[in-house]
Amino acid sequence: MNKSLFTNLIALIVLFSGYYFGNDIVFFAGLFAFSGAVTNWLAVHMLFEKVPGLYGSGIIPAKFEEFKAAIKTLMMDQFFTEENIDRFLNKEMAGEKTLNLEPILAKVDFNPTFDSLVEVIANSSFGGMLAMFGGTEALEPLKEPFVEKMQQSVVEISQSDTIKQAIKEQFESPEMMGEITANIENIIDQRLNELTPSIVKSIIQTMIKTHLGWLVVWGGIFGGLIGVASSLVL
């Protein structure tokens, strides 16, 4: 059962029991318990819903834009700082697994490279000699081994320390760092713009109400104790 509803029901039962039997201690305990429980329940309810006449109610939906801005500020200032991005790049650029271009290069078509090479040879002083041996078609059997060798050579070059350092320096340049940060910020903005006040309210409500329900319980308990003390004093 909902903790808030259960607490309010118990408080009402104690309240009416004290009134029915004429027991002031029980009556005041129930009255103050119900007062404390309802007050805390209303406070929790006012976080998410606008209550007419109560200033400050519905604070989460009303401050929706500020809420999104706070999330963005938190992510950019705490997670995606230039220091964290630089640390990530340093980590990713170190070791053999870093910047593995082989899967990308495997999809690159190197055939135009061979075709260009054949064209250069055909238009050079060797063109006439090549024509004596069957022209450019004579070089066709070399195409597949050439492409494989070219691909392998480019992969080896991409894994050299010189290339890694050059790319690392490029990534760490102020212009590139600013571009990376701007792209991350744009992605965060796009995702936050997909949120609606109702979605945000539902997320926070589900998360918070589970824990804030105890405020109602303790409000009822302490209210009851205050009621008992008040009846004894009176």
Image: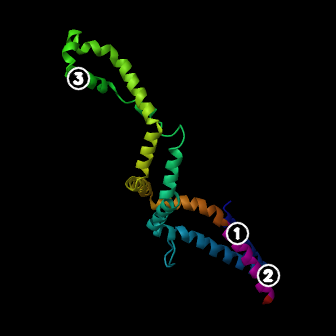
- What colouring does the structure picture have? rainbow
Instruction: Measure how far apart labels 3 and 2 are at the Cα level.
Output: 105 Å
Proximity of marks 1 and 3: CB atoms separated by less than 8 Å: no
Residue that mark 3 sits on: 119
Quickly name the residue at label 1: 217
Q: Decide: few, some or many residues near mark 3? Use Cα within 10 Å; few <14, some 14-19, many ≥20.
A: few
Q: Are marks 1 and 2 in contact (CB under 8 Å)?
A: no
Dominant secondary-structure state across the stretch colored magenta: helix
> Which residues, given as a range, are shown in magenta?
214-232
Disc 1 crowd, CA 10 A, few/some/many (<14, 14-19, 20+): many
Frontmost residue, 105 versus 136: 136
In the foreground, 117 or 38: 117
Q: Is residue 55 left or right of residue 29?
A: left
Mark 3 residue type = Glu
Of mark 3 and mark 2, the one earlier in the sequence is 2
Q: Which mark is in front, 1 or 3?
A: 3
Relative placement, left or right, of 122 versus 64 is left
For the residue pair 90 and 70, the one nearer the viewer reads as 90
Residues at marks 1 and 2, CA–CA distance in whole angstroms: 20 Å
On the image, numbered disc 2 is attached to which residue?
25
Q: Nearer the viewer, mark 1 or mark 2?
A: 1
The quarter of the picture where the C terminus appears is bottom right
Total labels: the figure holds 3
> Which callout, 3 or 2, points to the residue nearer the camera?
3
